[in-house]
Image (cartoon, grey):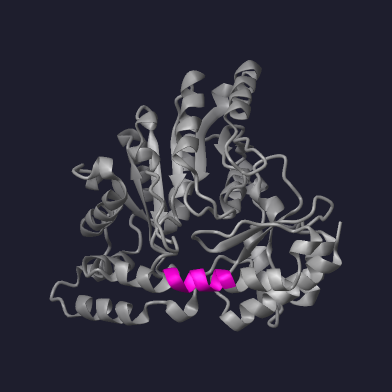
Amino acid sequence: MEPTCKFSALGRRARWPTIARLMSTALEKPKLLSLAAGFTDNATLPSGMVVEAVSRIAGKKDKEALQYGTNQGRPGLRTLLAEHFRKWEPALADAAIDDEFFVTNGSQQALYLAMQVLCDPGDIVLVDRPSYFVYLEMLKGMGVQARSIPVDADGVVDEEGFGTLIDGLKNSGEITRLKAVYFVSYYSNPSSRSLSLAEKIGISEVLKRAEVVLPVIEDAAYRDLYFENASAVPSVVGIDAWQDFPKLYLSTLTKTFASGLKIGYGYCSHREWLDKMLHTKGHQDFGTAHFNQSILEEVLSDGGLSLQLAVIRPKYQHKMRVLDETLRDEGILASGWKWQVPEGGLYLWLEAPSGVDTGLDSKFCQSCIEEGVLYVPGELCFGDDAAKNFVRLSYGVLSEDDLREAGCRFAKVAVSNRS
């Protein structure tokens, strides 16, 4: 008799992540140029700073950096992260918030912890449109439904449409399953746009008018990656309109310093919610990699993060321009494609003519792979009612020459696939 496993509902829902499928495709085809993975720029990774930080740590008599750490994260690192956060939030300039910070294995772990303690299968989470597709896949794996906050033709939050959505949830009785609202607020993955102050306030006002006060998760992973001018829009933590809502603000040092160190962090305004996440985290890892935290504590205390940001901001802006100009020079605008030039982040978000299907299993996608270029299909980035004619291109990891070549390969397919 062949042995069998009786899987849980979670196990039965488990599917190989699409991001893993995309990465496998890239590895299987060595000559394929990937504009899919949101990797950071290899040439600017701060190996020198890491060597110096490790040297200082090794020179200390106390070897605690090589020992287990605390579940919530190194106190010194949390203090430095709180200081960095307060620089963005004038309303919190004098706030004692260190103890509301926690450190995780990338911000992805924090997202999973938040969902684990809030949601059961069948519950609903409101998400931005478009949204971070790895998060959407996480929700699907947990049996949680994603409902998109409506937007207009320019991608701006549609308050009236959002109000109609909330009314529909109330009228159907589904409002009892609504557990959270989530959005990527600065130089978004995938769209690279930032939410305005009016949009942030508008979302909260719609919820308050409907007497729906629920946890809000603001994913600010790209907030530091502006090109020239930082967004002046505060997070939900610093906006009075969100005062009555439990708030979780998430960010990461993986995109801004070194992705291989896998350090993310969060600030939670609601103590019980934070405690529940930390309790669950304790069952998973009882302490994010302590040595990695020690390295980043050294870096932040020595001003290294600011130095690294000063290096990578112009680098990413230049790489964005290389890809943007290549696509334009290759003539895809004349074929009906369009996009906005981003002011930060790692992505171009392209809209194809309405008749062009760019989905994962589409002829267009297969043609791109055959041509030697890979992208993230935009259909993955919608919580519901997925649009089929969007594409996310990442300019983070490829060299300038490879970006030009990848752009030419993509444009060749785009121009030959008119709607």
Residue 25 to residue 237: above or below? below
Q: Nearer the viewer, residue 341 or 295?
A: 341
- Is 319 magenta? The answer is yes
The picture places residue 359, in percent across and down from the top left corner, at 77, 56
Q: Residue furthest top?
A: 171
Considering the whole magenta stretch, tell me its main secondary structure: helix
Above or below for 316 versus 75: below
Left or right side of 12 for 226: left
Decide which of 29, 402 is in the foreground and name it.
Answer: 402
Q: Tell me the quarter of the picture where residue 273 sits.
A: top left
Q: Is residue 135 magenta?
A: no
The N terminus, quarter of image: bottom right
Residue at x 21% of width, y 42% of height = 95
The quarter of the picture where the C terminus appears is: bottom right
The percent coordinates of residue 80 (x first, y second) are 24, 57
- Between 255 and 29, the one lying in front of the other is 255
Quarter location, residue 331: bottom right
User: Can you tell which quarter of the image residue 145 is in?
Assistant: top right
What span is colored magenta in the figure? 313-321
Q: Residue at x 32, y 50 (%)?
A: 88
Residue 198, horizontal then vertical, whole percent? 47, 36
Left or right of 208 in this view: 238 = left
Q: Is residue 280 visible?
A: no
Residue 345 seen from this side: yes
Q: Residue furthest left?
A: 61
- Residue 251, given in percent of the width and then of the height, sits at 40, 53
